[in-house]
Image (cartoon, helix red, strand yellow):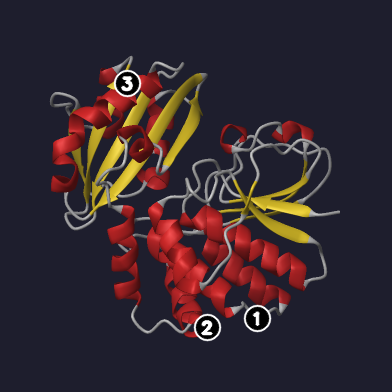
Amino acid sequence: MTIHVTGHSNPDTDSVTAAIGLAALLNAQGQDAKACMQSTLADLNPESTVVLERFGLAAPEEMMDAAGKTVALVDFSDIGQAPANITDAEVVTIVDHHKVGDVTTNQPILVRVEPVGCTGTVLNKMFKDAGVAVPKDVAGGMLSAILSDTVNFKSPTCTDDDKAAVAELKVTAGVDDTDALFMDMLKAKSSVDGVPAKDLLFRDYKDFDMNGKKVGVGQLELATLDQVAAIRDDLLAAAKEVKADGRHTVLLMLTDVVKEGTDLVVVSDDEALIESAFGGKIDGTSMWVDGMMSRKKQVVPDLQKAFGC
């Protein structure tokens, strides 16, 4: 029996490296596991590509359909973010750092969900608990994921556990300057030149069920909002196109990492509801939300309250 370890749709660096990390841990414990992702290598986001190349990690195997497979989930537990036919798979493990989703099982399984900034942090603890050394290349991937997910410790999701994990993993991975590593990742993540607007919207995007209404939230982390000034109309058109495919709302977080805030692009059936969720006022098609850095902690919970979830 092979355990297919996979992260969420539109995989980010945490989703990709967590699949690699958990598969490595399971294999070290004598189980047969392989890392998978809901993406082709060609479609993988630029940041994740840079991380895989930097640390010599093989990309996870593409897996878009889970039917009939034994599956471990990392970095998510929502059916809406799972491979096709997840209900026809046997889910045996969930390792995550988000809210508990709606994936269910017919028998008890291992579930480890912690309120930290990154799945990589949870996995680092799991390696230590199991008495298994993190391989150097895997440590580099997990380290990168924590820096990415916590925005180099600037995100409100960041915890002391994340900082402790970085301190440990950087030694194992042989990384002296984590700030430089983060900037290399940010340059890749924020690169928009020549990339179609819809691909940018989906670079880091998730759908959520908000009290029966489908709401999509994408995020672009940028060094400056000037990077997308020339393509804002294209990004808006892409959001409208995605919304037209059965969604109540599509939000695109244009997050300025330096200013530590987000210009939130809003396409919604109820703009007043979105304004009330974040206590702001939409100016044209967007609103600036000071301090907004995290979709998980600062967007989804407020949306859930506004939608009456």
Q: Secondary structure at mark 3?
A: helix
Q: Earlier in the sequence, mark 1 or mark 2?
A: 1
The residue at 32%/26% (across/down) is: 239
As drawn, is 223 to the left or to the right of 97? left
- Residue 171 position, x and y percent, is 48, 85
Q: Residues within 10 Å of mark 3 (few under 14, many from 20)?
A: some
Q: Earlier in the sequence, mark 1 or mark 3?
A: 1
As drawn, is 209 to the left or to the right of 23? left
In the displayed orientation, state which residue is furthest to the right: 1
Please give the label number shown on residue 172.
2
Q: Earlier in the sequence, mark 2 or mark 3?
A: 2
- Residue 16 position, x and y percent, is 54, 56
The residue at 40%/43% (across/down) is: 203
Q: Secondary structure at mark 2?
A: helix
The residue at 34%/56% (across/down) is: 156
Q: Secondary structure at mark 1?
A: loop
Q: Are marks 1 and 3 in contact (CB under 8 Å)?
A: no
> Label 1 vs label 2: CA separation?
9 Å
The residue at 19%/33% (across/down) is: 232
As drawn, is 107 to the left or to the right of 138? right
Which residue is nearer to you in this view: 115 or 251?
251
- Residue 27 position, x and y percent, is 76, 68
Which residue is nearer to you in this view: 221 or 44?
44
Q: Are marks 1 and 2 in contact (CB under 8 Å)?
A: yes
Tell me which amino acid carries mark 2: Thr
